[in-house]
Image: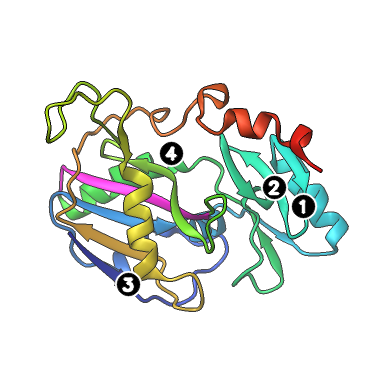
Amino acid sequence: MKIKTFKTRVFCENEEIASFIFKYIKKIREKSILVITSKIIALSEGRVVNYKSEKQKNKLIKKESDFALKTKYVWLTIKNNTIMANAGIDESNAKGKLILLPKNSFIFAKKIRSLLCIHYKVKNLGIIISDSGLIPFRNGVIGMASGYAGFVGVKKYKGEKDIFGRKFIFSKTNIADSLTTAATVCMGEGKEQQPLALITNAPVIFKKKINTKEITINFKEDMFYPMLKNINAKKK
């Protein structure tokens, strides 16, 4: 698997994103996956608010969240069935503004995929909308897919045998987030100015129509649910 990043100029608010991609990526071959940072998508959608005060920011975080809990460093929130900081609202590289998450990353990924398939004359193309995420008790952010299109995002091993012939019961691999993390390592999280990355030779199944719910799990079925449910009762 290979990952190639593209250094670009600063993307502008309300700018058209397809022509921006065409300018920096001249060719995409079959069975490639294009990773696009969610920030430039949010900018293209005008999902930007002028920062006025912490009170205003806190109110916006609550509005954008399905659940919000104030912690020592950030608001711990749930949005789009994902635990994240501050409902994904970002101040970094925002020039004094607040950048929200895209309206719907899965819908955007599907639409931009159709445009790119026509422009680059390919049939098998994956799109990933990348964002930053955290894993509890692990230091540093990782890449997470806030949306994707064109490939199967979860690989299932249930029913298959391991190297000793024992059948897997629950095992799955999160392909979408794993690819996003790999790309994020190359794209960077600072001032690298590389909002686009092209992945080739990835071990994925390309598919035009995907299940957008495959990447998430019901809260009560999650392995961490018992701990999260009882966290307040366990506090000392």
Report the predominant secondary structure element of the magenta stretch.
Answer: strand
Q: Specify the label residue 71 is tagged with.
A: 1
Q: Which residues are magenta?
A: 122-133
Query: Is disc 3 surrounded by few (<14), some (14 to 19) or many (20+) residues within 10 Å?
Result: some
Label 1 or label 4, whichever lies nearer to me, is: 1
Tag 2 secondary structure: strand
The answer to whether the residues at label 1 and label 2 have Cβ atoms under 8 Å apart is yes
The location of residue 87, given as percent across then percent down, is 66, 47
Q: Give above or below for 209 relative to 63.
A: above
Q: Are marks 2 and 4 in contact (CB under 8 Å)?
A: no
Residues under labels 4 and 3: Cα distance?
A: 23 Å
Residue position for label 4: 106
Q: CA distance from mark 2 to mark 3?
A: 32 Å
SS of the residue at dot 1? loop
Task: Check disc 3 and give the amino acid type.
Answer: Phe
Q: Looking at the picture, which amino acid does disc 4 mark?
A: Phe
Check the image and tell me how it is coloured: rainbow
Question: Which tag is nearer the camera, tag 2 or tag 3?
Answer: 2
